[in-house]
Image: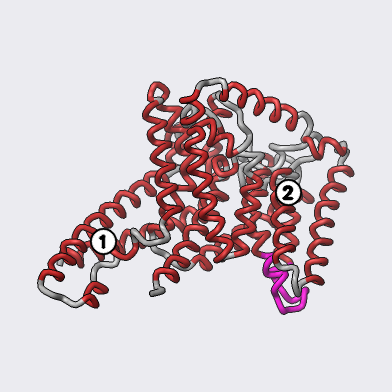
Amino acid sequence: MQNTFWNKLEKAVDTFGLVLIYILLIFLPLSELFLHLLQSFTGLSESQIFWAVHFYEPAILLFLILKIVAIIILKVSSLRGGTTKQSVGVTSSSVERLPRAEKKFGSRNDKADWLIVAFIILALISVITHRSDLSRGLEGLRFLILPFIVYLVARLSNYKNPHKIIGVYLIISIIIAVIAVIEYFFLPKGYWSQFFNINSFGFGQNSLVATTQASSLLAGPNQLASYLLLAYFYFLDRFLFSTKKLTAEFGNYALVVVSLAIGLTYSRSALIGLVIGTIGMFWLFGRGQARKISYAAIFVAAIIAAVFYFALAGGELPRDILTHGSSFGQHLLATKSSAITFFHGGIIKILFGSGVGSAGPTALKLGGIVSENYYLQILFEVGVVGLIIFGFFVKEIVVRLFHSSKTLFFAFAALLVNAFFLHIFSDNPAMAVTIFVVVGLVVNVENQALNSKP
């Protein structure tokens, strides 16, 4: 009776986790707009607005607590049940009827899970040991571990249908890409303020020097570009392997819109990741796809040339398209200065970092080490130890994706390249949550296949 109750509870918690995943997938691309709506049209305090926008954080914590409690109780009860059955000579086939929690954990495929748990624990220890600035540490912790916590939610949810999740994401990404293209060509700067009285948001807030960058509904052009990368590689894969005529495949039209939207952000880091990932995809799938690959290569080159032309026609200088005015030089100088300061901080700081919240988005907000590089952010915050743990986690995920989903592999690889130039997994929750949810669900599917083998 007790096992039945806890099994039912675990199923209910799994359902809660799945609902939470869908809410995150749909809400986070709209969260920046929601934030500015609350700021523009309500009299709520800053803290009330914060929790209204970040309501999902306590929900994630609640899910993890309930899931861990259910797992522990089922595990204990399974062990007791197994001991009792063995003592009365029950055959081994009856073990198959033990509660399913016994077979989900401790399998041969959990290395990535334990690595990311170790990373999260290290980050928590860092916050505690730097408790003299606890508010900064907690702020930084939210930025640093959200995608990995969501990865664990996806893994613990036991959900094994990533195709539905990807389908929802692709619908959202197409809508967001269409808005980006329309605003760039047809809407005035600051149209959110002019038409909707929503201030300090959207198109017109970011520009090179003379050229306004598309941002659609997200927080900025870099966030938009990285969010659309998964959609780009999905539709590119569809283009390469579809047997339909070019004009008969809806995905081809979506590929044009998504690619153009990425280009109109003028996000250098996203374009570098896109080009490297695309070359890798062409190389891997080159046999038998030469004609389509040549079409795709011409298409990508044409998109990049077109967005350069749009900027030049608007009065942008060629060097400013590449350097974004003085942005590139300032970021490079700040990163170099921060690295020198860090490595002169002593062996303890090098091994365990300057503390969570000392770099990345929190530093941009509260002051601190400017990294402009996600890997340097991890190094500065949790040290060489944290970076090594994260590196092994990424290695496990990359290997798994290469064998299970080539499309997701190239999208993830492009984002990893992107992360050399920005804090993309910390300051873009819409993208980070989406990619790590999908990765977690793909791992669920692969684990089910591997564990079903004798």
**What's the residue type where badge 2 is placed?**
Leu
Label 2 packing within 10 angstroms: few (<14), some (14-19), many (20+):
many
Q: Are marks 2 and 1 in contact (CB under 8 Å)?
A: no
State the residue at coordinates (48%, 38%).
Answer: 386
What quarter of the picture does the N terminus occupy? bottom left
Residue 22, placed above or below residue 196: below
Horizontal side of residue 177 vs 161, given as left or right: right
Q: Secondary structure at mark 1?
A: helix
Precedes in sequence: disc 2 or disc 1: 1
- The answer to which of 190 and 391 lies nearer the viewer is 391
State the residue at coordinates (64%, 49%).
Answer: 226
**Which residue matches tag 1?**
9
In this rendering, does residue 19 appear at all?
no
Main SS category, magenta section? helix
Span highlighted in magenta in the image = 235-252
User: Mark 2 to mark 1: distance in Å?
Assistant: 46 Å
Magenta span has 250? yes
**Which residue matches tag 2?**
271
Image position, residue 165 (x, y; %) = 51, 63
- The answer to which of 97 and 441 lies nearer the viewer is 97
Magenta span has 117? no
